[in-house]
Image (cartoon, rainbow, N blue to C red):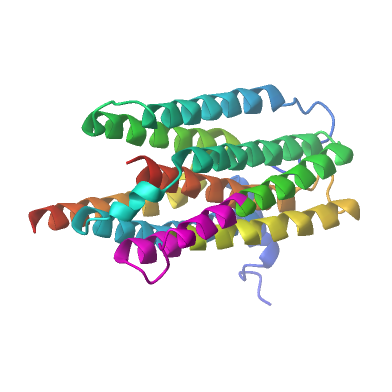
Amino acid sequence: MTSSSSPSTHVASRARQYVMVFVALAVITAIEIAMTQTSIPASLANVFFLAFSLAKATLVATFFMHLRDDSRIYTAIFLLPVVLVLAFSTLMLMSAGGH
Amino acid sequence: MTSHSITHEDEFRAGRELSLDHRKLGMWLFLASEVMFFGGLIGTFLHYKATVPSPESAELDTVLVGINTFILVTSSLMVVLGLDSIRRGNRRGLLTYLGLTALLGAVFLGGQGYEFVSLYGHGITLTSSVFGSSFFTLTGFHGLHVLIGVAWALLTLGKALRGKYSAEDHVGVEAFGLYWHFVDIVWIVLFTIIYLI
């Protein structure tokens, strides 16, 4: 939402959208748990786990934290340190892999 | 005060023109600092995971923690449903969903406590190994954030009971929600890097 000062009337409920996002999060989590009980090669499973994690985090930030509708300044403030942390972690793991 | 001085009202108006609420802006800046905080802890955990063998990780109960993950995700749904309620002037709905949020947060902490006790029973402690140290530090700090979130939910619930929030003014609920969802996102990441990969 873009403003907290909107009038009480004519405010449409987003409950349906929120429940749909929740169902998606629950289904992805269930798939993740089910995958840990199978014999899928770890290298392949890890790619899926990382993709699922990114998808879930994006869903929460976009819909539950309302970054889709709010000012892009909030998105920039949040994403900048995320990008820095990802770059830091990647470089550190590359360094660890070299030893 | 001269005619050229910038008043608080001017600054506030400038923020409004950018569609920014100074309370939400402060919350997002705080969350940005939290990203760096958890980023350091996660980086440390990943470094040790990549360089130090950790056979103790076989003792982790992925299914139990998966259920706990489901509980935390459900609590995030409760927060947005509470916000949706107060946006439409439904205070009773806000009270119900905030109560459920605090309850689910407490259940999550109970599950984490059970896991910690179970791991200590298997000899995995804060000082037993590099894995133990990095695992308990990372998940412990997240648990502390959930604990603070539960306290914040109860505080927000108390304010809602006193009629502090309305359809016109509910930024306090929104700010709490941002914190709670952030803690949820951190757990989504931790669940993946600790228990799945």
- Quadrant containing the C terminus of chain B in the rendered view: top left
- Out of A75 and B44, give the one closest to the viewer: B44
Q: Position of residue A26 (x, y in %)?
A: 55, 28
Q: Which residue lies at the image location 28% right of the left edge and 26% below the top edge?
A: A40
- Quadrant containing the N terminus of chain B in the rendered view: bottom right
Q: Position of residue A50 (x, y in %)?
A: 34, 36
The segment highlighted magenta reads B111-137
Task: Kindly indicate the quadrant of the structure image that contains residue B70.
Answer: top right
- Out of A76 and B55, give the one closest to the viewer: B55
Q: Which residue lies at the image location 67% right of the left edge and 66% below the top edge?
A: B8
Task: Kindly indicate the quadrant of the structure image that contains residue B9.
Answer: bottom right
- Relative to A43, is B185 above or below? below
Q: Which residue lies at the image location 79% right of the left edge and 46% below the top edge?
A: B99
Q: Position of residue A80 (x, y in %)?
A: 38, 51
Task: Find out whether residue A10 is within the magenta segment.
Answer: no
- Relative to B83, is B105 above or below? below
Secondary structure character of the magenta stretch overall: helix
Task: Find out whether residue B117 is within the magenta segment.
Answer: yes
Q: Position of residue B78 (x, y in %)?
A: 70, 38
